[in-house]
Image: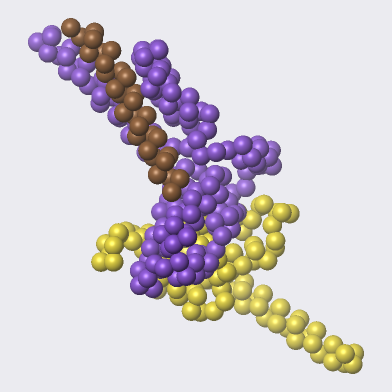
Chain colours: A purple, B brown, C yellow
Amino acid sequence: MDGDELVRDYLGRLDAASWPLPPERRAELADEVREHIETALAEAGRRDSVTVRNVLERLGRPEEIVSSEVDSEPAPPRWIEARIAEAAAKAPTLGALEIIAILLLTAGAFLLPVFGPAIGLVLVWLSTRWTRREKLIATAIVVVIFVLPIVGLLVVTDG
Amino acid sequence: MDFPLVLLLIPAAGIAAAIFLIVVLARRRH
Amino acid sequence: MSGMVHGDTRNPLTELRRGVLEHCVLAVVRDRESYAFDIVRVLASAGELVTSEGTIYPLLSRLRRDHLVTTTWRESDAGPPRRYYLITDEGRRALDAFAGDWARFRDAVDALLAGGARRGESDGR
């Protein structure tokens, strides 16, 4: 693998290992690590696979970084930890909740007008895989595209 | 005259939001 | 110390290292603000302090959460804006407390190690 592929692979492993983290922190940590790598490579002046390997080696295994992150959080009670471990065992990046939400937003708009996408949006908010900011943006998109023209038309026909 | 517009806007809004959400997740994988 | 509650599944040496490292980071940002990569560099040059450089980020996140440091974003010519860390008053208090604890701890361990060596000699080993 060449340098950039190694970096992508590492960041992918970091993302996969980050499943226990709250979405905001997950995204933030990814940014911090990515920037660390870029700064280190900029300083070294090269991005060949040997240099990249050294940088990633010094960075440490993604699992270790996440483990350190988890240790720094106040501990949840044991039963919550057990549930989390359970969920982790079956957690891909895209979960059932997220798939259903997206289906409702798209196909659901045809099959169940208004209600389908509305429920889809509720599911988006219930998901843990998107940050609050992303959820707000998605909601804003729906509002702008759907609600505002309606309001505009109502105003025009009344006037 | 409003009704056909509503039928077009709902899917458009949902699909636009869905695309955004999918892209966000896809970019996070990297 | 808060955050140490994961207990039996964790290596006690890991806890110790993290607690010490936390305060080393506070010491680095005590007198002037630094950004993450710079902090790592200073720690690395000070000695064998960090096994995995990436673990500095969870540590910094925790220091922020506990209000022991503040952060400021600053423009950098080398690319995107950087987050600069600086100690807070609460951080200073924590650092002073640690300095005392560490000195006592270090002296106690050193004394025991020295005493142990002498005992070994007198046993004829």
Q: Quadrant of residue C11?
A: bottom right
A42 above or below C5? Answer: below
A2 above or below A126? Answer: below
Residue at point 37% right, 70% down?
A46
* Residue C13 visible in the snapshot: yes
Report x, y in % for residue A49.
Answer: 45, 66
Between C27 and C48, the one nearer to me in the picture: C48
Between A140 and C34, the one nearer to me in the picture: A140
Residue at point 25% right, 24% down?
A145
* Residue A80 visible in the snapshot: no
Q: Is residue A83 left or right of residue A49?
A: right
- The C terminus of chain A: image quadrant: top left
Q: How many marks?
A: 0
Report x, y in % for residue A30.
Answer: 44, 52
The residue lying furthest to the right in this view is: C123
Residue at point 61% right, 67% down?
C17
A37 above or below A27? Answer: below
The residue lying furthest to the left in this view is: A159
B30 above or below A3? Answer: above
Report x, y in % for residue A117.
Answer: 38, 20
Report x, y in % for residue C99.
Answer: 56, 74
